[in-house]
Image: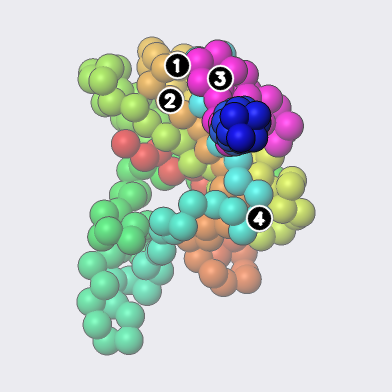
Amino acid sequence: MQYITRNLIAAAALALLAGCTSTGDTTGQDQTGAQQDATTEQGITAQPGQDAYSYPYGQAPSQYDTYDTTGGTAGGQASGGRPGQAVAGGGSAVSADRIVYFSFDSAEILPESQTIISKNARVLTGNTRIITQLEGHTDERGSREYNIALGERRANAVRQAMIAMGVSPQQIRVVSYGEERPADAGHDEQSYALNRRVEIVY
């Protein structure tokens, strides 16, 4: 009887140890290494001191922004927005002075966007505790993968301009949504122009 009890206790101890090692939880340095490996595997690139996020098609966070392109009314009801103004699910909006627009298939900052970037850079240099997220967007033309990369290049172009204006790199995060969050759902050049943008969120 004593032999069976001893074997049962040993088997229970082994089962408990096996269960603990297979949970997948990691701690300390292993967790940091696992995060870096996952980022590398997804092909997400980040410059030193920068967090970069790219979301594959259909995998962007569920808190999508919606855009009021009707001039503030939709179906006769006031929606509280201005044309081309992003309205987040909670009712907050990305104002026009925080949106940088781009030409087709380009990550080059247009001269008219310099004032928007410099105004926001002054805000960030004036308060180093503010962290901003630069969200790169594209129109629907091109493959999803290409658009994710183009959105990231656009956001990084704004990031580099802000750093050149004195903003700390640690204050800036870059994310690319590609074509996932259009400002205008239309399929004409005017809609595409609204979708080619970087939103400065803080």
Q: To which residue does mark 3 refer? A: 32
Q: Is residue 71 left or right of residue 15?
A: left
Mark 3 vs mark 2: give the one in front: 3
Between the residue at mark 4 and the residue at mark 2, the CA separation in whole angstroms equals 24 Å
Q: Amino acid at mark 1?
A: Pro
Q: Is residue 19 above or below residue 171?
A: below
49 or 31: nearer the viewer:
31
Please tell me which residue is depicted at 50% across the width and 15% down the height of the picture.
28
Question: Which of the marked residues, 3 or 1, is nearer the chain's N terminus?
Answer: 3
Instruction: Look at the image and tell me in which quarter the C terminus lies.
Output: top left
Q: To which residue does mark 1 refer? A: 169
Q: Is residue 93 left or right of residue 157?
A: left
Q: Amino acid at mark 2?
A: Ile
- For numbered disc 4, what is the local secondary structure? loop
The reply to whether the C-beta atoms of the residues labelled 4 and 2 are less than 8 Å apart is: no
Residue 65: which quarter of the image?
Answer: bottom left
Q: Is residue 101 above or below residue 134?
A: below
Q: Amino acid at mark 3?
A: Thr
Question: Which of the marked residues, 3 or 4, is nearer the chain's N terminus?
Answer: 3
Please tell me which residue is depicted at 68% across the width and 25% down the height of the picture.
37
Question: Which of the marked residues, 4 or 2, is nearer the chain's N terminus?
Answer: 4
Q: To which residue does mark 2 refer? A: 172
Q: To which residue does mark 4 refer? A: 57
